[in-house]
Amino acid sequence: MTINIECVILRHLQMELKSPFTTSFGTFQTKEFILVEAVDRDGVSGWGESVAFSAPWYSEETVKTNWHMLEDFLVPLALAEPIHHPNELSKRFSAIRQNNMAKAALEGAVWDLYAKRLGVPLYQALGGAKKDIEVGVSIGIQPTVDDLLQVIERYVDKGYRRIKVKIKPGWDVDIIREVRRAFPDVPLMADANSAYTLADRERLKALDEFGLMMIEQPLAADDLVDHARLQPLLETPICLDESIRSYDDARKALDLGSCRIINIKIGRVGGLCEAKRIHDLCAERSVPVWCGGMLEAGVGRAHNIAITTLENFALPGDTAASSRYWERDIIVPEVEVHRGLIRVPDAPGIGYEVDRRQVERYTQFVKVFHRPPTA
Ligand code: OSB
Ligand code: MG
């Protein structure tokens, strides 16, 4: 098949979160992001969503650096020649260093377009087979322990398959102890977003007694070596998030013993193609993976659902219902969770309609890029 992209439309959107989301590195109240629409010669649209945040807290990428990369480098590369398979695009993009979230947003739009042209759901185009996916929920740092317990109860009652609690020094062992006391059997994990160093090993070791499924990214994003030192000291499996930006990072982490589980975020690793390669590597090595979240709106959520249908996404991910963050999402239907499961949609492409009225409502500016006459 040949995909001839006629134009790429970049939109800058801003949406208010229903309630603030706090991690060890900062608080989110509004979400700005770039929505990518790739339109082919027959007027079929594919959609991608950049997961970069406003500020470089989680990684060095921001909404503005993504816009710059897309406008000046990636969109021109995508428009320069026809594309025969989305995998080709990630090869084309390898000429540009890093900037994975920008690459993933555009590659995602092309994957959606590709699947729509084939007339198959995106998850099938990726080789996934699950009809339902299991999901958990990530809970930010709360003002008090009572607030935290109340929020957890709400999601446990809704049937979410595991609870992830954000931790940081001073909001860790005592808090997890309280959560365990209130919910002795709930599948539970903690995410530190790099808030610790090896000097905190005793504190991290103290979490072992709570039977956590894993502790996510305790140490620095660029430190596979220290994670490899820490893992043998803990009974709790380490899961890496920020540290894994590519297939090679995953290979090195597994070779070093830096983790026993990997959180795959499509944006962080540069797209669906790389995400699938990491999934396959982990499957070969019997290392389970799960799909992380970046407070996505509907398009990003739909991509997460599609990749999670691959078999070795063996643990519940962070893709919660649209209503967990949004008054009104940008897709129809919205993502719904029943008894901790999301039914995977079977319509072609991402399987959800983009609600153009809502998109317009949230859009702050738009730029259209046309195919050059020579392509
Ligand atoms: O580390 O997984 C993370 C949110 C923002 C930045 C980083 C992370 C998160 C989450 C929320 O944990 C996941 C979600 O609900 O989208
Ligand atoms: Mg994380």
Image: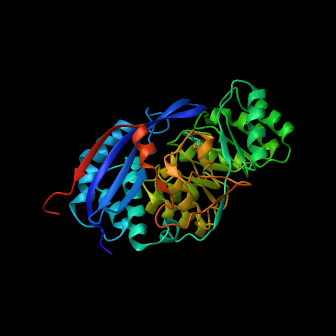
Residue closest to the far left = 374
Instruction: Say whether residue 10 is left or right of residue 29.
Output: left
In what quadrant does ligand 2 lie? top right
Q: Quadrant of residue 38?
A: bottom left
Total numbered circles? 0
Indicate the quadrant containing the N terminus: top left, top right, bottom left or bottom right: bottom left
Q: Is residue 56 above or below residue 213?
A: above
- Measured as percent of width and height from the top left, residue 94 is found at 33, 57
- Measured as percent of width and height from the top left, residue 153 is found at 78, 39
- Measured as percent of width and height from the top left, residue 322 is found at 59, 46
Q: Quadrant of residue 218?
A: top right
Indicate the quadrant containing the C terminus: top left, top right, bottom left or bottom right: bottom left
Q: Is any part of residue 94 visible from this angle?
A: no
Instruction: Say whether residue 372 is left or right of residue 15.
Output: left
Tell which of 192 and 149 is nearer to you. Answer: 149
Residue closest to the far top = 143
Q: Is residue 139 above or below residue 247?
A: above
Residue closest to the far bottom = 1
Task: Describe the colour scheme in one phrase.
Answer: rainbow
Q: Is residue 2 above or below residue 246?
A: below
Q: Quadrant of residue 372?
A: bottom left
Q: Is any part of residue 356 visible from this angle?
A: yes
Residue at image x 32%, y 41%? 67
Instruction: Say whether residue 27 is left or right of residue 360.
Output: right
Residue at image x 30%, y 45%? 69
- Measured as percent of width and height from the top left, residue 21 is found at 59, 33
Tell which of 57 and 182 is nearer to you. Answer: 182
Tell which of 225 and 340 is nearer to you. Answer: 340
